[in-house]
Amino acid sequence: MEKILCSVIVPMYNEEAVIWETYNRLTKVMDELNEAYEIIFINDGSKDKTKDILNEICNQNNKIKMIDFARNFGHQVAITAGMDYAAGECMVIIDGDLQDPPELIPEMIKKWKSGYDVVYGKRKSRQGETLFKKFTAKAFYRILRSMTDVSIPVDTGDFRLIDRKVCEALKQLPERSRYVRGLMSWVGFKQTAIEFERSERFAGETKYPLKKMLKLASDGIMSFSYKPLKLASYLGTLLSGLSFLYLIIVLLQKIFAPETVISGWASLIAVNLFFNGIVLLMLGIIGEYIGRIYDEAKGRPLYVISELKNMEEREGPRFKM
Ligand code: UDP
Ligand code: MG
């Protein structure tokens, strides 16, 4: 069998409106390269016609492969499955909605051939996204950077090319709450960036509602930092200091103006509510970490596959069901 140079990994969740266009643009770019390639579509439990269309494409063209998930496992898990099954010497991860331009792939491959192991796409601008999304995304990347010891590049999504050895290193990381781009920074290797304008979605709507965005953000922060837990000690120290000052005031009041002491109901309730709030907040943060420990402890597989098209099953720890 011919050795595959590049595997393109494309997660797809309810993307019926864009698949044909994505397929056409990707194959056009890849054909022009004149190298052996494969495109792996991961159907992440779509509820629309995504699977039927992908099936049709796979029947037409055996360079196109499909991993069909048994349900929606999420974008990051879909990418992971793609990397588990990719056969190429390098692999490109790209969104299925054409927000990441496939035309950048040849340039990425050129950089890779010149010796880089990771070539990531850095967003110069984002088009067709709401102000809210632009703002929260910018803020998130910067908060994440300030909280972690691993340097995770800002304004960088999952659009990137990685060398096979990076993929092999990633396979050694068994964790379940996956923030793939963080994991890639964690394993290291020689990295470089290519800047690009992030265009509008070709069709359809974002598959990242606020809830999924928050999940991704908390996975990103909590898998790479325990600073939120430290918040408890900082707040605790600050507040006990303040309470001690207040205690002195109360005592002085009692000694020098005993007749005013009884009037403290408002301050009492305020202090009480404030402290209860902080305690609940900290319990919540600790709970988030415990939940993640619980998830890891169960040791379930990351994903369950219902069907493979144009490819064979793999052996390995992640594939046991
Ligand atoms: N996606 C997925 N599973 C999900 C959500 C999204 O596979 O649960 C895919 C989606 O089909 C797309 C990519 O992940 O190819 C990025 O999603 P989207 O474009 O909706 O995110 P946005 O660009 O709005 O952040
Ligand atoms: Mg998108």
Image: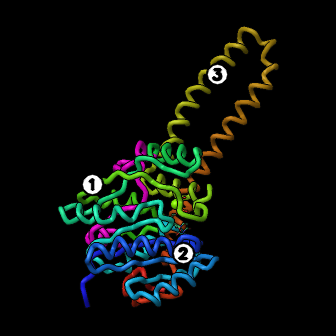
Circle 2 packing at 10 Å, graded few (<14), some (14-19), many (20+), is: many
Q: Earlier in the sequence, mark 3 or mark 1?
A: 1
In the displayed structure, would residue 7 be above or below residue 219? below
- Is residue 229 visible in the rendered image? The answer is no
Q: Give the range drawn in magenta.
A: 144-171
Between 131 and 70, the one lying in front of the other is: 131
Residue picked out by circle 2: 44
Furthest residue in direction left, as rendered: 114
Q: Which quadrant of the view contains residue 81?
A: bottom left
Secondary structure at badge 2 equals loop
Residue picked out by circle 3: 246
- The amino acid sitting under disc 2 is Asp
Residue picked out by circle 1: 192
Q: Is residue 152 left or right of residue 293?
A: left
Query: In the rendered structure, are the residues bearing label 3 and label 1 in contact, judged by CB atoms less than 8 Å apart?
Result: no
- The amino acid sitting under disc 1 is Thr
Secondary structure at badge 1 equals strand
Circle 3 packing at 10 Å, graded few (<14), some (14-19), many (20+), is: few
Q: Does the magenta stretch include residue 280?
A: no
